[in-house]
Amino acid sequence: MSRLDLHLHTTHSDGSCTPTEVVSLAHQAGVTALAITDHDIMTGIPDAITAGEQCGIEVIPGVEISSMMGQSELHILGYFLDWQDPVLSERFQTLRESRHRRNPQIIERLQALGIDITYDEVRALAGSDSVGRPHIARALIVKQVVSSAKEAFDRFLADGKPAYVPRELPHPADAIQWIKEAGGLAVLAHPTWVKLAGRSLIELVRELKAAGLDGVEVYYSTHAARHTREYLSLTQQLGLLVTGGSDFHGITKPDIDVGIGKGTLHIPTSLLTKMKAAVGRM
Ligand SMILES: [Zn+2]
Ligand SMILES: [Zn+2]
């Protein structure tokens, strides 16, 4: 049974598998087309395309941009963008630099809490310069401060916890515009994670649509059946595209597999046809 997976992270951001490994896992899972959607970076795309060509998997260039609207952190996925666009690369560079400033601040807070941890240790563990909170969580596990990534976030790293440092994030309207300017489709990721702060989801999505949003990630590893139904109906009401993905990260989210999420995810390949029609790539 052929399937899609349009939300995958690699070692180019906070995933633990290389783009080539992710493509190979997708091949084993019966995925026929996938999108690599690393955080604020698209350097993993060329390796994925090469690996995809070798095993007959279509690789769609993608990205995931974190944005902030009021108190809500919104993740905007981009698809079919020009991954070599120099303006976009520069924007991503600026976003990553802001994250680089934030990580040492998180480490300082952990140290102030009496935890023996250094930024160098976290960077060594990440294996690249693309360090995120999941790497800090992993370092805390290695140091036996916590026993799981969930515990690291619940006790220290999540919003409102003692080592939390807010990020300087773009507004979702800007993230959407950047994606559009690079020729891509903009999609709201995992709506269940969105903190609505008294608003309705449809109201929020309507506002994003006015800013250029093209679709909503309806199928997702942790969406319950009622979520999927609710989001499907929302996309129908607003005339938006439907997408789906596992949000695979490798060992940082060990219960989520490429293509099948927690085992029951199945993203129909027909969604891709509509996305291609929307972006004029038929
Ligand atoms: Zn996300
Ligand atoms: Zn993601």
Image (cartoon, rainbow, N blue to C red):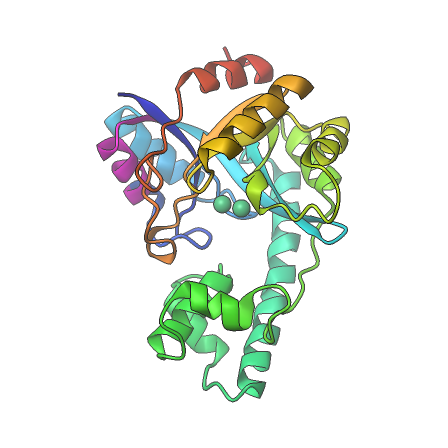
Q: Nearer the viewer, residue 247 or 199?
A: 199
**Extreme residue toward the left, this view:** 28
Left or right of residue 42, residue 266 in this image: left
| Image coords of residue 176 (percent x, y) | 68, 35
Residue at x 36%, y 79% (from the top left corner) = 143
**Extreme residue toward the front, this view:** 226
Residue 168 visible (yes or no): yes
Residue at x 53%, y 73% (from the top left corner) = 156
Left or right of residue 87, residue 263 in this image: left
Residue at x 72%, y 37% (from the top left corner) = 200
Q: Is residue 249 above or below residue 187?
A: below
Q: Is 27 a magenta residue? A: yes
Residue range corresponding to the magenta coloring: 21-34
| Image coords of residue 160 (percent x, y) | 64, 68
Q: Nearer the viewer, residue 77 or 218?
A: 218
Which quadrant: the N terminus?
Answer: top left
Q: Nearer the viewer, residue 139 or 80?
A: 139
Quarter assignment of residue 124: bottom left
